[in-house]
Image (tube, rainbow, N blue to C red):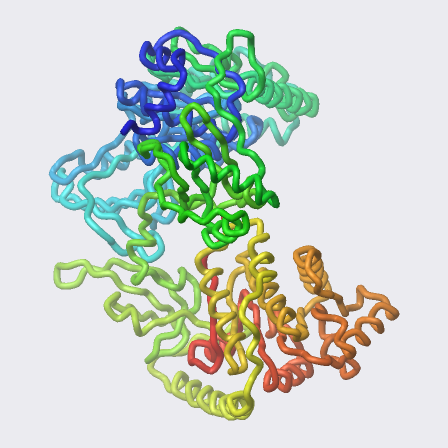
Amino acid sequence: MTALWKEVIASEARLARWVERGGGELNVARLPRPAWPIVAGSIARGLAARGRQLLILVPGPDRFAGELRLWLAGNPPTYVFAEVAVSFLDRPPAFDESVNRRLEALVALSEGEPAVVVTSRRATTRQTISRRDLVETTVVLRPGEGPDPVAVAGRLIELGYTREPLVEQHGQFSLRGGILDVFPAAADAPVRAEWSGDAVETLRLFDPENQRSVMAIPDAVIRTGRELLIGPDRGAAAVERLHGTVSLDTLRGDVLSEWEDELTRLGAGAAFAGVEFYAAYPSLLDHVPPDAVILDFEPRRQLTDARTLLDETSMLAAAEAGGGELPREFVLPTVEHLDDFGTRPRLAVTAGEGDGDAVDLGWFEGEPLVGQPRALAGFAARADAAAVVFATEQDERVRALLDEAGVTPPLKEVELDLDMDLAPGLERAAVDMGAGWAQPALRLFVATDAELFGRVRRPSRGGRARTRAADLTREFTLDFAPDELVVHVDHGIARFKGMRLIESDGAHREYLELEYAEGDRLFVPVENLDRVQKYLGGEGAPTLHRLGTSDWTRARGRARKVVQDVAEELLKIYSLREARPGIAFAPDTAWQQELESTFPYEETPDQVAALGEIKADMESDRPMDRLLCGDVGFGKTELALRAAFKAAMSGKQVAVLAPTTVLAQQHFHVFRERLKNFPVVVEMLSRFVDDEAQARTVEGLKSGHVDIVVGTHRLLQRDVRFKRLGLLVVDEEHRFGVMQKERLKKLRAQLDVLSLSATPIPRTLHMAVGGIRDMSVIQTPPE
């Protein structure tokens, strides 16, 4: 069998000759956007087999690179020469993630190995580091090799790194005798190097949060995080050029002083944020090898976008010059020649008609199948002679659609990549793609969620694949930062001052430094870390305890008495809940599945787990009292909405209680919008609703006409009566007053309760941890 990428290239003779010859120019037209990644990946594989590099110019390079990596699976590796979000007229930060990615792409080009670099013409309008500087300024540390730490520190300063007492962020380093800590610009974790004499003895990654070493590494590569290295000679030349071409006389007084200060630093060769503003340096194309190949998607559109960006920048520069914020003759460091590819081979691609001699590769957009069982059956029938692939993660829903269309054969699971072998049959790939396509000549037909369900699911973009230090030391990571309050189990409340490396008996050990009242200090060895925890008290700043006194003992005694009183009160409430049978809600209905499938984002793993726990509680006859914790924007409201809909489908009413009118209004709009296509009545009670509408809602709750009501403390007033209330959703319960909490306590003894909180108070959290209340946690943010 032949791999897919080879068949893609061989399907069009002119494309195959162009890849084989590796020269000249070829135009491709009518290639639909969903097919771009598979065609680009096939060309990249063909060029990699011949030892060639590929530069791809495409609108939206980040998105395209993510789609391309799915097909390439790392062979060859893919890099992004990213677009920098900072305006040409603004000073970029000292270390920018997009700049690091640009430098990674340049390094890949300089190494000469087969690789793919994805970028856009907008990204190439900004100049970058020279090829010589990129290669010559790289610092490599290996055990058994030099130079000495002082020389390395000097090199780091030249590369724009700053010396700090502790290394916590990219671009920082610290030097303590023969120990050098550095956080390389493009690395995921900082490095600790220890010298013995003039040679490195050990190299280890360490965690920037607690400064603890993690694991040994064979070498460390340190590169600059800037796209311009200046130095005294270049700085002096740049200042001389600026003084000879521009006049500072038109600048405002405050702006003039800033320019004079920065030009002084520039003349001394200092590296500072925004130094790139003052000097001319090369473009991306200066780094692209002469034998590299250019794959150019929608070149006219890209040129228009880039020219628009440059024109807007020129207009803003003229406006700033007119306002005395920029010298009138100053020329911004932009790249104007965006099509200077020289003699490099180029393949231009458009989804439109193109020129008369353009090649049509025979790809078509996927046909819509939503709501058309006969069309779906016809699409599946092609499996007798072609590979028909359903690219979706919604296995059960696809199976239901096929059953409805009368398609009975099982779906074979396949990996959708460039190495797959095409064979007739019905197949499913567990991937979430933007849209489908068809290639009749290859006998390949792919349908995605867009064709099957009429919408595009937007998957979360995972983080970078490399291992981070925080993951390597998850069990060792401190829960507190310097100057935060902590509690030592034996000595009480103190202020954490940081980690200290102290020499004892000829050996260095790491200690936690704790500050107590009257300036007392306590140094706790890291092996006794379990004796210290973060302070989680209530409102107001507590008083630090004194060492050597009974203050801490008395405080613990008072707390023990309060805990006992609270426990007795809670036991009364929860014993009532356990003695009374709760409501066993019905299993999920077809409408429940339909509602959940219309969620336009990919659920995070934590959301899926929490939803399963909530549904299990609701279907049990034991009254639910679950705390759902998660930061703002992590998806708590969506889970509450699904729980409310489940209760409504079981014939019960739902009350959603919010502490503020604005928050209640937000919840109401979300519930109304998500449930508008279902037979569920959603109303609101708050001061935003007039008296007449409130009266209708109250009457609807009594009669059972209103299924879900969203409101503030107005829901707790005595005139509000429910006919069949089954679920209470409480958002940020700790923000309600004393009277409202008393009313909630009575309600909690009678029905299922789901509490949402981004910042649960210690008592609520302790009840959940202790098993009095159940708890679900959403720790994974949507991206």
| Closest to the observer, 484 or 589 | 589
Q: Residue at x 75, y 71 (%)?
A: 706
Left or right position of 514 against 221? right
- Picture layout, residue 465 above or below residue 539: above
| Closest to the observer, 735 or 239 | 735
Residue 354 is situated, as x and y percent measured from the top left of the image, at 56, 13
Q: Is residue 263 visible?
A: no
Residue lying furthest right in this view? 692
Left or right position of 309 against 37? right
Numbered-mark total? 0
Q: Residue at x 64, y 28 (%)?
A: 253
Q: Residue at x 51, y 91 (%)?
A: 571
Q: Residue at x 31, y 53 (%)?
A: 207
Q: Quadrant of the N terminus?
A: top left
Residue 510 is situated, as x and y percent measured from the top left of the image, at 24, 61
- Picture layout, residue 582 above or below residue 631: below
- Picture layout, residue 572 above or below residue 42: below
| Closest to the observer, 539 or 734 | 734
The answer to which quarter of the image holds residue 480 is bottom left
Q: Is residue 39 visible?
A: yes
| Closest to the observer, 578 or 276 | 578
Residue 296 is situated, as x and y percent measured from the top left of the image, at 47, 18
